[in-house]
Amino acid sequence: MKKNNKATFLIRNIPENTFKKLQFIAEENNYPSMNQFLVEQLEEISRVKVLSIFEGELGKYFKELNDELSKISVKLNEMEIEKVDEIKSLKGIEDVLSKLLLFNQFADEDYEAEK
């Protein structure tokens, strides 16, 4: 059935005991009608379910993102270690060049002294 562009649903075959409990809850919470109570309860159930699904998907996304960030962090650490090793090897080269320059300086001083 349709009425004012809103669907009207009828719930059938609810056990009498369950219906009485629902009716009691609706009255205790001052709902103007049983239909409004049921519609609001169904809306709440669907909202909670959608949020639950969304949270699950969001959790998966954050886990994947965290895994990727961990991989990037490991790679950056490896690159940093490589750079440190390169710098150490350059330091070794610098030491050798420094000694060569010092040797050349002494050699030049000796050569000038011999003239």
Image: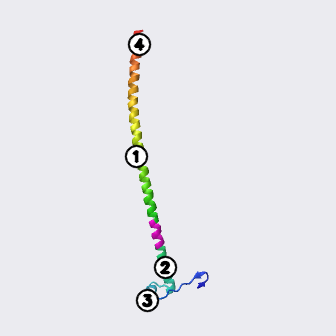
Q: CA distance from mark 3 to mark 2?
A: 18 Å
Where residue 27 appears, as percent x and y from the top left, is: 45, 87
Residue pointed to by mark 1: 77
Q: Gap in Å between the C-alphas at discs 3 and 4?
A: 115 Å
Residue highlighted by disc 4 = 111
Q: Is residue 32 visible?
A: no
- Residues marked 3 and 4 touching at CB (< 8 Å): no
Crowding at mark 4 (Cα within 10 Å: few <14, some 14-19, many 20+): few
Q: Which mark is residue 25?
A: none
The C terminus lies in which quarter of the figure?
Answer: top left
Q: CA distance from mark 4 to mark 2?
A: 101 Å
The mark nearer the N terminus, 3 or 4, is 3
Residue receiving disc 2? 42
Q: Earlier in the sequence, mark 3 or mark 2?
A: 3
Nearer the viewer's eye, disc 3 or disc 2? 3
Q: Residues within 10 Å of mark 2 (few under 14, many from 20)?
A: few
Magenta residue check for 55 = yes
> What number is the disc on residue 15?
3
Q: Name the mark nearer the viewer: 3 or 4.
A: 3
| Three-letter code for the amino acid on which mark 1 is drawn | Asn
Q: Which residue shows up at 41% across the image and 43% down it?
A: 80
- Quarter holding the N terminus? bottom right
Q: Residue at x 38, y 35 (%)?
A: 88
> Three-letter amino acid code at disc 2?
Leu
